[in-house]
Image (spheres, coloured by chain):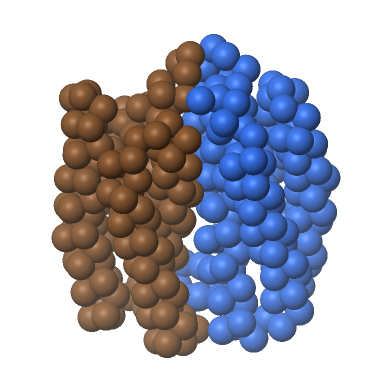
Chain colours: A brown, B blue
Amino acid sequence: MKTLNDLFLHMLKDVYHAEKQILRALPKMAKTVTAPELRKALELHREETLRQVERLEQVFELLDKRARGEPCEAMQGLIEEAKSVMEEAEAPEVIDAGVLAASQAVEHYEISRYGTLIAWATQLGLKDAVPLLTETLEEEKKTDRLLTDIAEKQINRKAA
Amino acid sequence: MKTLNDLFLHMLKDVYHAEKQILRALPKMAKTVTAPELRKALELHREETLRQVERLEQVFELLDKRARGEPCEAMQGLIEEAKSVMEEAEAPEVIDAGVLAASQAVEHYEISRYGTLIAWATQLGLKDAVPLLTETLEEEKKTDRLLTDIAEKQINRKAA
């Protein structure tokens, strides 16, 4: 990696792989939780993630590169944590609180990644990539706020 | 893990381990980067992290538990990503941009974790834990903003 362009492409592949990993993990997470609002939020976020993957593919196209993922160890770790909560928590309310927290950690990872990708795309003059990445960033932030809301209004109280 | 208390203690151990891992990684990251402002920010954040570890130890004390970490796979993944940027990037400006981005991913992970810990501590009535965790959360947010500032004002431009 010699240039910011190389770094941008590297992170794009990393985020592409991360989104595909979370896409595979979300149905299990949605199925495992009990609170209907949380399940719905996870299901909706899966639909959203499908579109986010498509947007990343559009960015690859803008760069004239084939969409390809590169294993993202951070996301693997985040998903492992979500899995271990689902396995180790015994009460449904506690599973819900743990899965919700794990989802927020995933959202925050993505918020930081898309923030960086937007800054680099702007610097590199990749004008058509910026709105695509910004749309996804706003969705991730919105999902994070929705999860905070669900946690505060019910999940944490039920788990306590 | 049967209760929110168990989950809180589990996440406390996870974050304690994560902070100790980043504490070990920061000196190498600070030494590897070239831009003085970024190096200074990473060195200052190391000092800050020392105090954050102490605060976590105070929270363990409030719970009457021995401070003990539990391997945090997400943070391991985040640190692996920082290491791979340091190894694979060839130009100093590109290393700086990559290390800065990796540091922001770490900050965002911590922001999500402390946010959850504060919500759970509040729900559990752990009144003395809340200000300790909030002080750290504010520091993490401040560090993230400082890194964005350094990225936008110079690092990204130099790397492009």
Residue B18 visible to the viewer? no
Q: Residue at 35% of width from left, 27% of height from top?
A: A9
In this rendering, is residue A111 above or below B58? Answer: above
Residue A121 locus on image (x, y percent): 40, 37
Q: Is residue B129 left or right of residue B88?
A: right
Q: Residue at 64% of width from left, 54% of height from top?
A: B145
The quadrant in which residue B40 appears is top right
In this rendering, is residue B154 above or below A29? Answer: above
Residue A16 locus on image (x, y percent): 28, 38
In this rendering, is residue A89 above or below B73? Answer: below
Residue A56 locus on image (x, y percent): 25, 41
Q: Is residue A132 left or right of residue B100?
A: left
Residue A106 locus on image (x, y percent): 40, 54
Q: Is residue B143 left or right of residue B50?
A: left
Q: Is residue B26 left or right of residue A88?
A: right
Residue A119 visible to the viewer? yes
Q: Residue at 16% of width from left, 60% of height from top?
A: A47
Compare residues A131 and B124 and report the one nearer the observer.
A131
Compare residues A16 and B67 and report the one nearer the observer.
A16
The quadrant in which residue A1 appears is top left
Compare residues A126 and B13 and report the one nearer the observer.
A126
Q: Residue at 60% of width from left, 26% of height from top?
A: B158
